[in-house]
Image: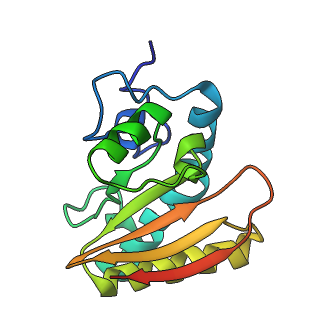
Amino acid sequence: MIDRKQKLSVHFSLEELTHTDYGKPGDNEPPLEAITNLITICEDWLEELRFRYNMLYVLHFLEDYDTSENVEGIIINHGYRSLLVSEAMKKAGKNPSPTSNHLRGCAVDIRCAGVEQAIRYLTILLDMSDENKKDSDELILERRGIKYWIHFAVRPENNRRKILFLLE
């Protein structure tokens, strides 16, 4: 049994990145490889996204970063997804991809308050990729009704730098 309270990075926990509304408790237990992939996303990408977003759009002074009540967190809708959870999603009428990066812990869906926040997140992630010379596999802006999120994936190797806008 894994410790769901385990921190993957300073601001992100395994519990947050394995939460699901599908299947039974215990159906979404990630293997060590998936946890390692989630740690990479959190440490190398999400922590920096959180920091930059707050510095650029929320806070005015660097010294306020750790103490301000105005600091915004990055909210993850979905992270790791097991095969059992994918099956439960199918039964619920959802259509999870059988080759999804979520299955290996290589993807997260980042909740966005609206299209403006989504564009800001996308811009920061693309800038980070260019500056660090590290590619992501998928950077997809998605919308269903009034809900926006960014599907962001990073594989250990063979990242495709795929950028899409899927707006229903």
Q: Is residue 78 above or below residue 31?
A: below
Relative image position of residue 99 (x, y in whole percent): 61, 51
Relative horizontal placement of residue 40, taking residue 48 as reference (left or right): right
**How many numbered circles are shown?**
0
Q: Residue at x 38, y 25 (%)?
A: 27
Q: Nearer the viewer, residue 106 or 15?
A: 106
What is the basis of the colouring in this image?
Answer: rainbow
Name the spot of residue 135 as percent of width and height, x first. Answer: 72, 68
Q: Residue furthest top?
A: 1
Residue drawn at 39 percent across, 62 percent down: 110
Say which quadrant the C terminus sits in.
bottom left
- Write the residue at 43% across / 70% down: 150
Quarter of the image with the N terminus is: top left
Front position in the image: 130 or 78: 78
Q: Nearer the viewer, residue 48 or 40?
A: 40
Q: Is residue 85 above or below residue 40?
A: above
The picture places residue 90, in percent across and down from the top left corner, at: 36, 46
Is 109 positioned to the left or the right of 156 in the image?
left
Whether residue 88 sits left or right of residue 40 in the image: it is: left
In-image side of 108 versus 111 (left or right): right
Residue that appears at 66% across and 66% down: 136
Specify the quadrant of the image occupied by residue 66. Answer: bottom left
Q: Is residue 104 visible?
A: yes
Can the viewer see residue 13 in this picture? no
Q: Position of residue 151 (x, y in %)?
A: 47, 65
Q: Is residue 39 above or below residue 66?
A: above
Q: Nearer the viewer, residue 31 or 90?
A: 90
